[in-house]
Image (cartoon, helix red, strand yellow):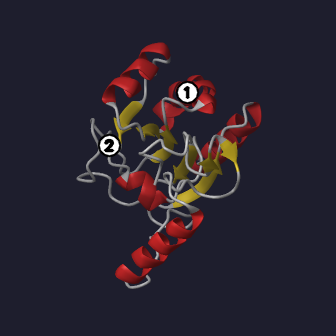
Amino acid sequence: MYCKTKQCGCRERGTVSGRRSGRPCAGGLSPLRAVLLGVLLWVSTGGAGRAEWATGTRLPELQGAGLAGSLPALKGKVVLVDFWASWCAPCKKSFPELDQLSRDYASRGLVVLAISVDESAEAMAAFLDKHPVSFAVVRDAQQKIVGAAGVESMPSSFIVDRAGTIRFVHSGFHGADTVARYRQEIDALLAP
C-alpha cells in the first residue's frame, strides 16, 4: 500500500523518508510495529499471500473493480496496462511515449490503459492537463487494483496478449530502452 499518512515523508512505495532503502513504507510506524502489524495481517488472512500479477497469469477482470472512469473494450486486444501517479517524475516522461505507441498500434489491435493510483481526482486531472493523451485513463483511488497487482514502483506496466494472459512485466521507465522493449513485445504479440 502506498503511504497515506505522509508521516514518513515518502511519496511512493519502497521509500522511507524520501530515500530508497529497499524497505516498504511503514506509514510512520516504527520498524518493530510495522513487522508486528504485518504478522497480524498475515495471521488474520490465514497466511494467504496476495495474488500478484505475473508473467503467465491471466489479467484479472477490471470491470466492477471500483475504478473511476470508463474502461475500453479489452477482449481480443493486446493491452498495455500502465500504473502511474501524478507525483511520479518518470511518468511525465513515459506518457508521451505511451501516447505514441497507442497512436502507432491502435489500428493493429493495441489498447493502452493507464491506471492512476492518485487518491485525488484533482491531482490526476492536473497531470492530464499538462500531459494530454489519446488513450484510456482510469483511477484506482482505493488502490485495490495496484495492491492486487503487486506494483512496487511507478510507473509499472503489464503487456497482455489477445487471450488475456500477462506476457511481459516492466518496472519503471527507462526512456528509449523501455520504449524499444515495448515495441518489440507488442510487435511479437500483434504478429499474425
Q: Which image quarter: residue 58?
A: bottom left
Q: Residues within 10 Å of mark 2 (few under 14, many from 20)?
A: few
Residue at the spot of label 2: 73
Q: Is residue 192 visible?
A: no
Q: Which image quarter: residue 47?
A: bottom left
Residue beneath the point at 45% across and 21% down: 127
Residue beneath the point at 56% across and 30% down: 98
* Secondary-structure class at tag 1: helix
Front-most of residues 136 and 192: 136
Residue 168, relative to residue 90: is it above or below? Answer: below
Q: How many marks?
A: 2
Front-most of residues 105 and 65: 65
Residue 98, relative to residue 110: is it above or below? Answer: above
Residue beneath the point at 47% across and 31% down: 107
| x then y, percent, for residue 128 | 43, 21
| x then y, percent, for residue 116 | 42, 38
| x then y, percent, for residue 71 | 30, 40
Q: Is residue 142 visible?
A: yes
Front-most of residues 181 and 78: 181
Kind of residue at badge 1? Phe
Outermost residue to the left:
64
Apparent side of residue 68 relative to residue 117 in the rendered image (left or right): left
Residue 191, relative to residue 147: is it above or below? Answer: above
Kind of residue at badge 2? Ala
Residue beneath the point at 55% across and 67% down: 56
Residue at the spot of label 1: 95
Mark 2 and mark 1 lie on one chain; the one further toward the N terminus is 2
- Point out which mark residue 86 bears: none
Front-most of residues 14 and 26: 26
Q: Residues within 10 Å of mark 1 (few under 14, many from 20)?
A: many
Q: State which mark lies toward you, 2 or 1.
A: 1
